[in-house]
Image (cartoon, helix red, strand yellow):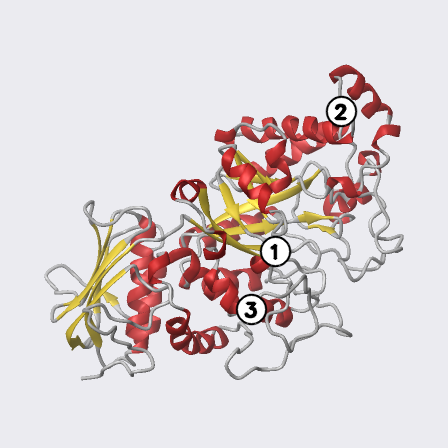
Amino acid sequence: MFRLPLSCLLILAGSATAELPLIPRPAKVVEKKGTFSMTDPGRVRIAPFNGSAMALQGLSAAAGRALSEAAQGQTPQIVVMRDKAAPKGEGYRLEVDERGALVSAADDAGLFYGSQSLAQLIAASGGEGVPFVSIEDTPRYGWRGYMLDEARHFSGEAAVKRLLDAMARYKLNRFHWHLTDSAGWRIEIKKYPKLTTIGARGNETDRSESAPVQFYTQEEIKRIVAYAKERQITIIPEIDMPGHADAAVLAYPELDGGGMVQNGNPQKWPHFTFNPAKKEVLTFLDDVLKEVGGLFSDAGMIHYGGDEVNFGWKKWPELPEVKELMARENLKDNAAVEGWFNRRMAKSVNDLGFKTAGWDEIAVQGLPKDKTVVFWWRHDKPAVLRQALEAGYPVVMCPRRPCYFDFIQDGSHKDGRVWGGFNPISDVYQFPASLKLSEKDEKQVLGIQACLWTETMKTQARRDTMTWPRLIALGEAGWTPADRKDFASFETRLPAELKWLRAHGIQTWDPFAKTPEVSDKGAKVEYPDKPE
């Protein structure tokens, strides 16, 4: 019978607990003697759930042949079944013995993730035998996320679906979709067609009037949302306000609240803000949020940005509507105006049935704690994280160090951000240990998230290699209990996943072979084709 190689199976001394070729590393594992080999035709019985077709597909791909549903009276070799006594909250049990493999879970996510783990074991066995094992697994955090910025440079439907496939493999469950920013508006809004005919034109690199428009139609978004849902991934849309507004203002100049000039470049960004007090602006944003809410009805929240507003608010005191608002509401300065705007738009989000999500600047805006989620991103401001936690806000932790993947990942790399250091895969894996969160803190932390800002990423190859394999490390960091995390073990399990990524059309940097950095300096911008 086939046994897993030592590079993938590391028995922990003095313990019945075993290391298996699984990423993320399960919470509890007990290896037993023996292996199970599937015989043709490889019959399975999978309880119906949202994602069951994907589970069967994944198991078949791992086995290297099409598995079939067992008919009545036939004995299945793999069973995926609901069990109210199984771990809840995305957890599962996986038992492999002489009878075959049994995945049991209390919810759809657990059934899917248990199937993913079994598929990894089958694939690692080479089809010759799966080791007898007992696994009981639940995630450390309920939020294991990745944010993709498509405003600066656009990836397109095919690339996003490849990304979602890989996220599902590593049990990542939140896709934060940054769809609007100064460089481009990427979501169709039926009531305001100029947002895409004009606002979607070009990108961070190409601001010319001849640049093509790039955006997602509402039908494309519906397809991607459904695709993600089958993979147990919730998509969180982000519509940035009141800053990062140039693309919207380009389409509708009457929305303008003034801007800034970045690095002496008059194209970046002269119309950075919406006018926060103008009735027409508030109506426009209410209308946009209503359409967005209809497209992402299962998101649970809408992210409305709320960051870096002070970069472009210099003209606010000159605007008649702002002057009138400040007098009426007794607002003393621009910060107070920003707070008023945040509360006004948060109510719009809440009235649509969603929580309000925003970057950590919103933690001081007086938003309701039961309807607000704070995304802590300023790694150099740990006091902001502490303030949000002590105020009672649920928090998603995505600090620039180590969670921003536009930072370089190796000391030999030159193209990317460095801010008092960079973000190697080891730092991503160890996060959030350095924060020394208390038990009380952990209860308020929803989870962790990586963010890919794409200002310097004109090609998909660069976006991929800046993401992978660091996102695999974040997947394990978000799933595996703190006392089970082991970077040396992770390194033994990672090479097989680099092969998997490449086999599925995803380019990855190889930290073992130290493959050359993929730089976009001098490269032409890619404009993805629309799917047929």
Q: Is residue 223 visible?
A: no
Q: Secondary structure at mark 3?
A: loop
Mark earlier in primary sequence (3, 2) = 2
| Residue 354: x %, y % from top left | 52, 33
- Left or right: 124 as drawn, with respect to 210: left
Q: Secondary structure at mark 2?
A: helix
| Image position of 369 with respect to 194: above or below | above
The numbered mark at residue 424 is 3
Looking at the rendered structure, the kind of residue marked 3 is: Pro
Mark earlier in primary sequence (2, 1) = 2
| Front-lying residue, 229 or 42 | 229
| Front-lying residue, 413 or 48 | 413
Cα separation between marks 3 and 1 = 12 Å
Residue named by callout 1: 400
Looking at the rendered structure, the kind of residue marked 2 is: Lys
Mark earlier in primary sequence (3, 1) = 1
Marks 3 and 1 close (CB-CB < 8 Å): no
| Image position of 128 with respect to 400: above or below | below
The numbered mark at residue 279 is 2
Quadrant containing the N terminus is bottom left
